[in-house]
Image: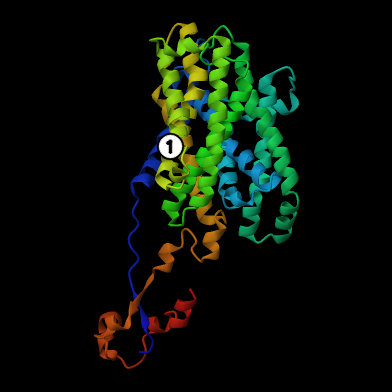
């Protein structure tokens, strides 16, 4: 036997479900059961919604938070293609995939909430231009189509449709511009929805600047979620973390947080609502947690360039921003109405599990896309593709020194049965040493 290495056959390890996969299937199963009950028995059977609280967890989280999460799409795409910031090009594809899944989950959640999913197309033909919800519905559908076109290049690469891929790349810049305009419109329009309830929404959250605040906070949420997904995907797929790129992204996030925080405080001072933040009330406590967690703490963590270069601090700051953003949307849609409505809203367990199901499906779909689409091109160039690690380790390279006991044909009896001088069939099918070096 010649060469410095050989190959030893190893048995494929048995499939293990694992904790996170088990949690995924559990959440999806329970969520599907709750969804079926909702469709069959109505909202009253699975929610604690009422005339006092018609917008609960599904609107506050599944729609407002999910659409805000999609803010990463127009932020990164506009930065790369419109402002030509090529340093962020490596995170464009995962950002587009994440934004598409966020908008798709918002659309599915709306259909579950409405209970008549076959009527979701009505805004296309039943126009009400005086309604903010009409504009939100149109922008949501159009921007989902834009994200589909932006991400279609990954599918065309996968299927080898080169002509369509060239066409998609030709129209990328116009698509991005349209997407930025649409996303700007409906991100701000979500805030404009609450301008019609000045007597019901608490003064800590009601403001004529809500459209602008919703737009700026969506940018921060999107940037933070890109950092989180980069960290999680680097661990899951064993790829290098783009620390310099994420450090630049954190610098942009820091500026966005400063703009949002200063604008929010000045607006509250102008409206006379700032003293309300220091009163011993439930609303004041929720406001303090929101600002400290989503604005103040991330600004402190990201203020230093040295800290922005540390992956752990980047991840911690991004998690704080995301949770602060979620709390802001829930405060605006639920907490801020409780004092005027004279009660408290607590979601029922089916509401919670349907929401968790949507979160699990988004992460599961992103993992599936990252494994089977060219989401991370640098992994393909290096020959490391997610999902192929098991296949690559089916034969383990072994040094020549480990094969000293195999001195003749008689040593292969444990693999081939009776000793024969003829080369076994499994040995002829092994890759050569040259093939191993090329791989």
Q: Is residue 394 above or below residue 303?
A: below
Q: Nearer the viewer, residue 76 or 169?
A: 76
Which residue is pictured at 60% across the width and 45% down the height? 96
Q: How is the image coloured?
A: rainbow
Which residue is pictured at 49% across the width and 6% down the height? 340
Which residue is pictured at 47% across the width and 10% down the height? 275
Task: Please provide percent x and percent y for residue 203.
Answer: 53, 11
Q: Nearer the viewer, residue 321 or 140?
A: 321
Q: Is residue 105 above or below residue 310?
A: above
Q: Is residue 280 left or right of residue 373?
A: left
Q: Is residue 232 above or below residue 129?
A: below
* Tag 1 residue: 301
Task: Please provide percent x and percent y for residue 281.
Answer: 40, 10
Task: Please provide percent x and percent y for residue 380.
Answer: 54, 62
> Is residue 143 in view?
yes
Locate residue 431: give its quadrant.
Answer: bottom left
Q: Is residue 212 left or right of residue 353?
A: right
Quadrant that contains the N terminus: bottom left
Locate residue 148: give its quadrant.
Answer: top right
> Is residue 63 in view?
no
State the count of labels: 1
Q: SS of the residue at dot 1?
A: helix
Q: Nearer the viewer, residue 118 or 272?
A: 272
């Amino acid at each position: 036997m010649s060469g410095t290495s050989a190959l030893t056959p190893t048995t494929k390890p048995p499939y293990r479900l694992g904790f996170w996969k088990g949690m995924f299937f559990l959440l999806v199963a329970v969520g599907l059961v709750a969804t079926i009950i909702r469709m069959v028995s109505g909202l009253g059977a699975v929610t604690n919604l009422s005339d006092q609280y018609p917008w609960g967890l599904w609107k506050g989280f599944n729609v407002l938070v999910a659409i805000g999460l999609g803010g990463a799409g127009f932020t990164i795409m506009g930065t790369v293609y419109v402002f030509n910031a090529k340093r962020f090009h490596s995170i464009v594809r995962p950002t587009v995939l994440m934004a598409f899944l966020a908008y798709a989950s918002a659309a599915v959640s709306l259909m579950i909430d409405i209970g008549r999913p076959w009527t979701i197309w009505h805004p296309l033909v039943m126009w009400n231009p005086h309604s903010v919800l009409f504009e939100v519905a149109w922008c949501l559908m159009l921007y989902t189509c834009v994200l589909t076109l932006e991400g279609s290049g990954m599918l065309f690469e996968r299927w080898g449709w080169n002509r369509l891929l060239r066409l998609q790349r030709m129209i990328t810049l116009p698509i991005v511009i349209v997407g930025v305009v649409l996303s700007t419109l409906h991100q701000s329009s979500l805030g404009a929805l609450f301008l019609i309830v000045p007597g019901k929404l608490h003064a800590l959250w009601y403001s004529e600047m809500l459209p602008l605040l919703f737009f700026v906070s969506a940018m921060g949420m999107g940037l933070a979620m890109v950092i989180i997904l980069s960290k999680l995907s680097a661990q899951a797929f064993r790829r290098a973390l783009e620390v310099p790129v994420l450090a630049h992204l954190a610098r942009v996030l820091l500026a966005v947080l400063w703009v949002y925080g200063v604008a929010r405080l000045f607006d509250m001072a102008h409206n006379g609502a700032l003293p309300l933040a220091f009163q011993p009330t439930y609303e004041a406590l929720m406001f303090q947690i929101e600002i400290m967690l989503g604005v103040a703490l991330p600004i402190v963590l990201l203020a230093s360039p040295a800290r922005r270069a540390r992956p752990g601090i980047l991840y911690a700051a991004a998690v704080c921003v995301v949770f602060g953003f979620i709390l802001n949307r829930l405060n605006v849609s639920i907490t801020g109405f409780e004092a005027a409505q004279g009660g408290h809203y607590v979601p029922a367990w089916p509401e919670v599990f349907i929401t968790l199901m949507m979160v699990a499906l988004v992460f599961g779909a992103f993992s599936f896309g990252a494994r089977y689409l060219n989401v991370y091109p640098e992994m393909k160039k290096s020959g490391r593709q997610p999902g192929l690690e098991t296949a690559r380790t089916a034969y383990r390279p072994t040094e020549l020194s480990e094969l000293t006991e195999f001195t003749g044909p008689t040593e292969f009896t444990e693999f081939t049965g009776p000793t024969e001088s003829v080369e076994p069939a499994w040995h002829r099918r092994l890759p050569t040493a040259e093939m191993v070096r090329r791989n």
